[in-house]
Structure formats: structure tokens, C-alpha cells
Image: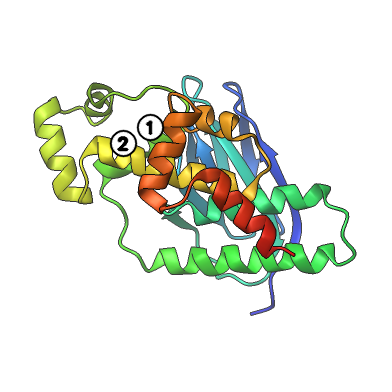
Amino acid sequence: MSSPKLRRVSAMPPNPHWRMTGQRHTHHEMIVVYRGSETVTMGSTCIVAKAGDVLLYPRGLDHDEVSDPRNPVETVCIAFTGGVSRDFSQVSDSGGRIRALARWLVDANFLTYPDIHRLRSSYLNVILEEFGRLKTVPRENEIVRSVRAYIYSNMGRHIAVDALAAEANMNKFHFIRKYRSLSGRTPMDDVWAIRLASARSLVTDTSLALRTIAGMSGFANEYHFARRFKAQFGVTPGSLRTRGRVAAY
């Protein structure tokens, strides 16, 4: 198997009218779903890809993709050659590592750096390694997957347990018990864990203002964000960002 070689990477913002039919590429294509959902058709197989999913289409595979008009899909598309098998694969990026790395890969399009091609290749290799690891992890229960996709797609908004129960099509109290037995956390504990993990990636991987990150991640204000962040990680967002800058020198 030849070494992977990046062809291109691009970010696609949400578009309720987006569709791409009759696709068949001479390269492999990885689709990283950040928000929303899309319907994917491959011959007689039809799946729904949701926020947190990562899809890998091998070269030569016929496929159609159609965004959900009510919940438009937001993705990063990575085109590359070599390095993978010829089978379609789908994983759940529950830890958010691939989404963070894919964001780095997109940002690298705008970097001026003498060895930018090596840097981009390094990012791609790590993404493929993490994808391979996730293929060995048992797939999330469909209830947990759907609820987490809803959380990812509504990160900056208020999320109530009633809305999560409705997403799972279950009675609220039965849903809370069921979700905890499946995921090891209550639904709202999972909401805050996902918010904090997303916020931490934004703190370390971007230069966005902490106030902006707080809003994007669903915290009431910067103080609420800092308090929750320190309780979870033992350090404030500002201190973590400062440590990262010092370590870079």
C-alpha cells in the first residue's frame, strides 16, 4: 500500500440546498461532519451521516450526498491518494480528535511556512491513524449517537434535557435512565463534557477570544466558562492558552 498523499482539503459551510450526486473520484475522500446531517447513497445502501461522524469513500466508489434541508450539514472534505483499503468506512469521532486535526489541516491552507507540505502530510497521517484506531472501537449505540449529534449541531445554543429526550423519541425520565446506562453519564453531564472538550480544542487550536469561545460552546458568559473549565481541567482557559504559547518557543 502506497503512502498517503494529500490532494486537497476544503471546508463546506451549512447549505440547506447542497447536494452532490453521481460522484466517483480517482482519489479517496474523507468527510468529517461537524454539524447537521446528510443522506449518503451508495448503490442500494443508504445511510444518514450526523455531526461527529467521519466517512471514508475509497476511490472509484459511486456515491451521492444530500444535505438535510432542515439541519444543513457542515463538513470538511479531505481528498488524498494511497494509505487506505478499498472499502467504505464510517466511524464516530467521539473524542473530537479528527475534527480538531481536520480544522488544523484547513488552516494550513493559509500558512506561510517553508516546509508546509511536510506539515500537511503529518496532519493527514495522524488523521488516518486516528481513523484506523476508531475503526476498532465498538460503534456508539444509536440513541447515544443521535443525541450527541444533536449536541454537536446545537453547541452554541441552550440545550434542555426535554429536547434531548425528544431527539431520542423517549419519555424524559426513561431517557435519562437509559442514556446513563448506555453512556455512563447523565444526558446533561454529557452535554457539558462535550461543550468543555470542544472549548478546550478551540482554546488550544485557535486564536479566538475566550468570550467568543464561551458563546460558541454554549456557556452563559466568560465567567461561567472559566469556572466550569477550571473545575474540569484544573486550569483556566487563559492559563492553558498561555502555557501552549510558552511551550511553542
Quadrant of the image occupied by residue 74: top right
39 relative to 127 in the view: left or right? left
Q: Which residue is labeled 1 in the image? A: 150
Q: Residue at x 48, y 68 (%)?
A: 132
189 relative to 90 in the view: left or right? left
178 relative to 106 in the view: left or right? left
Residue type at mark 1 is: Tyr
Q: Position of residue 147 (x, y in %)?
A: 31, 36
Q: Which residue is labeled 2 in the image? A: 147
Q: Are discs 1 and 2 less than 8 Å apart at CB?
A: yes
Residue 96 lies, with reference to residue 47, above or below; the image says below
Q: Residue at x 25, y 49 (%)?
A: 141
Q: Position of residue 26 (x, y in %)?
A: 72, 58
Residue 48 vs residue 86, the one in the foreground: 48
Quadrant of the image occupied by residue 248: bottom right
Residue 231 vs residue 170, the one in the foreground: 231
Residue 179 lies, with reference to residue 3, above or below; the image says above
Residue type at mark 2 is: Val
Decide if residue 227 is in sight here: yes
Furthest residue toward bottom? 1
Q: Is label 2 in a helix, a strand or a loop?
A: helix
